Amino acid sequence: MPLSKAHEAEVAERRAALVKLRRQAVPFDDQRILDLGYSSPGHASKDLIRALAQRRDDQAAEVSIYRQQENERLDALLEAAWPKATTPSPVYDREGNYIGEEIDFKAVDVVLKLMDRRAKLNGLDMPVKTEVSGPGGGAVRLDAVGLAELNHLIATAGDPDPDDLTDDGEDEDTAYVDEEDDDDDA
């Protein structure tokens, strides 16, 4: 059975007071929390969890509504730009002579930007994976290091490992090898 408006207001007021006390680091077994009407510290803790979950659900609902409105706006803009981006239009020179037909590349750019915005709004793009590695492609140390060492690591990031260099200073992994020359030497 749904709660009455008066009871909902009472619960909201009690939870607001509970959150305020917890923000002040008041423990659940403190008399000030129990005086709010909780029969035990465990009940107060459970009510705080419910309050946080309800707040999260309320925020999720608002975000969902916002996302839907933005998608509708993007739909309207895309609908307006799509015909110009996909249908060739006649092209004339300065004297008014017909040259041919082509699509409006500015409209294509607008459509691509709208599609990119929609992908970001709805989380459609895969996250970019980035790997951070130390000198020579090895692991990055996670222990405490000084600022000078961090700056050195940043400065040498991407530099080839000195042990991997050929006699002429090229990186063995990326050095150009002419296979025909190798065949002639044999």
Image (cartoon, rainbow, N blue to C red):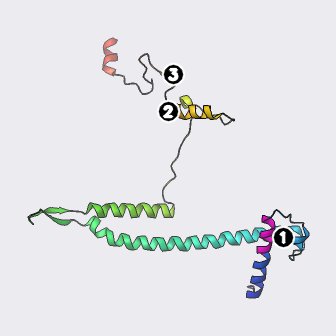
Q: Amino acid at mark 2?
A: Gly
Q: Amino acid at mark 1?
A: Ala
Considering the numbered disc 3 on the image, is that residue within a helix, a strand or a loop? helix
Closer to the chain start, of discs 3 and 1, is 1
Residue 140 x, y percent position in the rendering: 61, 34
Q: CA distance from mark 3 to mark 1?
A: 62 Å
Closer to the chain start, of discs 2 and 1, is 1
| Number of residues whose C-alpha sits closer than 10 Å to that of mark 1, classed few (under 14), some (14–19) or many (20 or more) | many
> Seen from this angle, which residue lies furthest top?
186
Considering the numbered disc 2 on the image, is that residue within a helix, a strand or a loop? loop
Q: Magenta-highlighted stretch: main secondary structure?
A: helix
Q: Quadrant of residue 45?
A: bottom right
Residue 108 x, y percent position in the rendering: 31, 62
Residue located at (82% from left, 62% from top): 25
Check disc 3 and report the residue beneath it. 162
Considering the image in quadrants, where does the C terminus appear? Answer: top left
Q: Is residue 55 above or below residue 166?
A: below
Considering the image in quadrants, where does the N terminus appear? Answer: bottom right
Check disc 1 and report the residue beneath it. 44
Q: CA distance from mark 2 to mark 1?
A: 54 Å
Residue located at (56% from left, 39% from top): 132
Marks 3 and 1 in Cβ contact (< 8 Å) = no
Q: CA distance from mark 2 to mark 3?
A: 12 Å
Residue located at (69% from left, 35% from top): 144
Highlighted magenta segment, given as a residue range: 15-23
Check disc 2 and report the residue beneath it. 158
Residue 20 in sight here = yes
